[in-house]
Every structure is written in structure tokens, then in C-alpha cells.
Amino acid sequence: MGRVRVHDFDSSAIARAAYDEDEATLDIWYKGGDRYRYFEVPAAAFEALLAAASAGEYVNRHIKEAYRFEIVGRRRFRPDP
């Protein structure tokens, strides 16, 4: 694991994000409790997330559909779809 930058958000959707510069991975903790890891995310995308007026809107428009992801953690007692 390389240098990791962590940021806590004042957002209704996003609680925290952590960006690993060496691995180019972005972990996002959603307010509902889920944690997702996005792969091959450039540093510029993390910087744009930090600068966005709405973190949730930025993630929805620029991260979710653009990068491969895995679910790292789920809130307890949440049924699978």
C-alpha cells in the first residue's frame, strides 16, 4: 500500500474517501455504511472530488460508471438484491 490520502466529507451521501496514490485506488464510504473500492482512478479525479460542490453528485456522474469497482464492506443486515 502506498501513500494514502483520506478526506472526510460533509455530504448527505459520502462519509469518507481514501485515495492510494501508488495503487490508484479510491475507497469511498457511503453514509449508508457501504464501502466501495474503485480501481485505476487518476489522482486528478480524486482532486476533482475534493473540489466538487457536491461529492455525491460528482461520484454519481464521474466515478461510478467510469471505473471498475468492488464492494469492500457492506452495512450489516442488508439483503443482497
Image (cartoon, grey):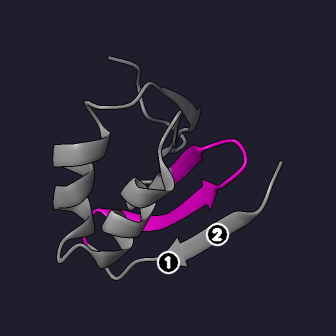
CA gap, disc 2 to disc 1? Answer: 10 Å
Q: Main secondary structure of the magenta part?
A: strand
Find residue 37 and report its horizontal and vertical position in percent. 54, 39
The residue singled out by tag 2 in the image is 5
Helix, strand or loop for disc 1: strand
Specify the quadrant that holds the C terminus. Answer: top left
The residue singled out by tag 1 in the image is 8
Which residue of the protein is positioned furthest toward the bottom in this rendering?
A: 10
Which residue of the protein is positioned furthest toward the top in this rendering?
A: 81
Is 6 located above or below residue 45 in the figure? Answer: below
How many residues crowd around disc 2 within 10 Å: few (fewer than 14), some, or many (20 or more)?
few
Q: Is residue 15 magenta?
A: yes
Q: Which residues are magenta?
A: 12-27
Q: Residue at x 53, y 75 (%)?
A: 7
Say whether residue 43 is left or right of residue 23: left
Q: Residue at x 19, y 71 (%)?
A: 54
